[in-house]
Amino acid sequence: MPVPRNVAERAKALREEIERHNHAYYVLDAPTVPDAEYDRLFRELQEIEAAHPELRTADSPTQRVGGRPLPEFAPVRHAVPMLSIRTETDTGPEGARNFDARVRRALGLGEGAPAVEYAAELKFDGLAVSLRYEDGVLVRAATRGDGETGEDVTQNVRTIHCVPLRLRGESPALLEVRGEVYMSRPDFERYNARQREQGRPTLVNPRNGAAGSVRQLDPKVAAERPLSFYAYGVGECGGWGVPGRHSALLDALEAFGVPVCEHRTVARGAEALIAFHARILALRDALPFDIDGVVYKVNALDLQKELGFVSREPRWAVAHKYPAEEETTEVLGIEVQVGRTGKLTPVAHLKPVFVGGVTVTNATLHNEDEVRRKDVRVGDTVIVRRAGDVIPEVVAVVRERRPREVEQAKPWSLAEAVGNECPACRSAIARADGEADWRCTAGLYCLAQRKQAVLHFASRRALDIEGLGEKLVDQLVERKGVESVADLYDPARINAATLADLERMGEKSAQNIVAAIERSKSATLARLIYALGIRNVGEATAKDLARHFGSMTDLMAADVEALQRVPDVGPVVAESIAGFFGEAHNQQVIRRLLQNIRLHRVEEGGPVAVLQGLTFVLTGTLPRLTREEAGALIEAAGGRVSGSVSKKTDYVVAGAEAGTKLDKARALGVRVIDEDGLRRLLGQ
Ligand code: IVH
C-alpha cells in the first residue's frame, strides 16, 4: 500500500525539525525546545516509521539509537590515507620555532621573506574517524586503523548526536570529513559517577572512553556512552570546489553543520603560533574536554602539496604538546575523609608529582569498591590523572611495578582501615544495601560534616564568603561553637573581636571576613539553594529549582510529586530534597538564614535577567535572527523557550510564514510580538 503523501511529508518535516533541535542542542549548545517537546516529536516519527518502514531513511534521527550487535567490524579502505602528525615534544616556545624554521627551509624562504600563514587548532585527545557523506547523507564512518585500512563503525558513530546525519545547505556529491571522536569531561564524570553508584566498572579516562565506545561491537552499549565529535580536515572529496586554505575548509565544514571547535585561528609566523600555544594553555583547564596539545598546519593547500610528506608524516603539520595530565607516582598511604553528607572517601596520599600543571599530593579513590576493583595498595605505583579543575584521581595501578611485599599484603578494606567508626567523630558507620558509599551516621553532630557543610556554604559558587577557608572553618566549628551555617550570621559568635583571637588571624583579616559575611547577605535564590548542600542538588538543579519555585517558602512546601515537575528532577533527587526540608533542624537553619539574607533575582555581574520567569515560543522566520540565536538571547536573559503554545506561554515571537503556533496563540489570547518587540523586551 503506498504511503499517503501527507504522512511522508510529515515524516520529512519531523526529521528536519528534530535534526534542527539536535544541531541547536549538541552543536550550538543553545537548546530550542524543552526535552518533553523533543521526545514527543521523536516518538511521533518513530510511530510513523513503525507503520511505514519504507520511510525510515539513513538520515532519520531514529537511526541514532543503535542497531544489532556485530560479529566483527568490516574493513574500510581509505582512498586518501589517514596519516598521523609529527609531535614536537618541546612544550616550550622552541617547539613552534623549530617547526616554522623547518617549513621555511623546505619552501626555500630566506630571512627577508614574509611570514608563513598557519592554521592553528586544538589537538583533541580521542579517536580519529572519517565520516563519508554522499549527496549530503552520512553513509559510512570508519576508524583510522593503520591509516590505509580502518574499521566500519557507522552504527556507533550514528549514535553521536552532534554528528549530522545529513549536511546542511548545498552539499558536495562526496565529502569525507575527518576528525576526532571524544568524550567531554562533564560527560565522562557523569558517566563514571553513575557507574560508581551502581557498582559498575568506570572508564579510565575520556580518551579510553571514546576509543572503547566507538570500537564497541554492540551499538546499544555505544549509544549509552556520551560521545562528541570535532572535525579537523577532509579526506576524499568530489563535486566540490575545495577551498584553497585550511581555515576556509573548516569554515565550510562548520557551515555544513559539522561541529568544528571555535578555538582556532590563523597565525602568521612562529611568534603568533607561540602566542596561540600560550593562550590555549591558559584556557586548558576551563575547556570541557581534554587536549594534549595544539596543532599547526600550513594554511595554503597548494603549499601543503608542495611540502608533501616525510615517512608518512606531513611536513606541513605538527602537534605542539602540553605537559601530561596523567603521570605515575607512589602511594604513601590511604586515608579516609568525611564529606559534607557524611560520605567516607578513601584518599591516596602520594609522593608529590607534577601533573596537569600542578603538584599533586592527594588523589581521590572515590569509594571502597573502586579501591578493590583497581586493587590499590600502599606501596603501589599508580597512574594519577588531573585534568581541568576536577580533583586528581588514581586511575590505575601499574602492576609490574608492585613490590613483592605489597603483593603479599591484604587488599585494602575501608571498615578495617577506620576500625568500623567515623574517623572524625567515632560514631558508627554504615553502608546501605545497593550503595557504594560508607557513611558516618552522626549527621551534623559529626564535626567533619559540620565543617564541610560550612565550607561548602562559603565556597565560591555558593555564597562566596571570601577568606572562609579550611583552617578558619576548623577553628570556628571547634572553638566558636558554629554548629550550622546560620551561626555564621550570629554577631554574638562571629564578629571582628571574636575572630581576631583565632590562629593566623590579625585584626585586618578579621575585619575582611566580617565584611565578606556581610556581602554574602545579598544572594540569589539559586545560590542559596545550592549552598545548603542538599544531597544530589548541584548548581544546575539549584538553578532549576529557583526558577521553578521562585521562593524558598514554595520550594520548602513542595512534596515529592511537585518537585518532580521541575525539569531534570527525578524520584531520587526529589526524595533527597523533600527529605532535607522535612528535617526540623534544617527548617530552623533556613528560617534563621532568611532573617539575614536578602534574596535578589539578578545574578551579580552576569547578564540582567530581564526575562526571568517568562516563557517564549518562536515561530516563523525572523528578519535578522535565526531561531537558535533568538532562543539563545532569550535564555541568556533568563527566559525559557518552549516548542509549543499553551496558556502558560507569555509571548509568541512570530516571523514570516508563521503557522499554526500563531493561530493557537491568537486563539488563546497569548501576546504576539515580532523580532523588534523581542529586542525591545531585551532592552536592545
Ligand atoms: S590532523 C595529515 N588535526 O592526532 C594530518 N589531527 O597524529 C592528519 N588529532 O590521529 C591529522 N587533533 O586523531 C589533526 N586538530 C587536529 C587533531 C588531530 C587530534 C589526532 C588525530 C591523529 C593524530 C595525529
Image (cartoon, helix red, strand yellow):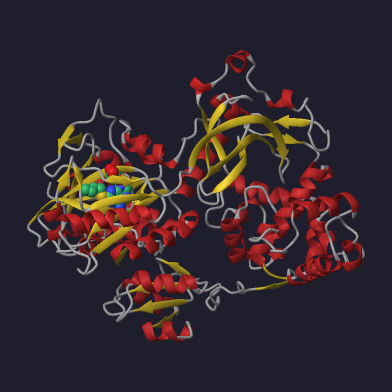
Q: Is residue 499 something one can see in this rendering?
A: yes
In x, y percent, where is residue 50?
26, 44
> Residue 104 falls in which quadrant of the image?
bottom left
- Horizontal side of 573 relative to 553 (left or right) equals left
- Rendered residue at 70%/33% (across/down): 335
- Rendered residue at 54%/40% (across/down): 193
- Horizontal side of 251 relative to 599 (left or right) equals left
In depth, the one of 678 and 329 nearer the eye is 329
Q: Is residue 51 something one can see in this rendering?
A: no
Q: Quadrant of the C terminus?
A: bottom left
Q: Is residue 559 above or below residue 602?
A: above
- Horizontal side of 684 relative to 523 (left or right) equals left
In x, y percent, where is residue 312?
18, 41
- Horizontal side of 213 relative to 602 (left or right) equals left
In x, y percent, where is residue 370?
57, 30
In x, y percent, where is residue 619?
34, 73
> Residue 130 falls in which quadrant of the image?
top left
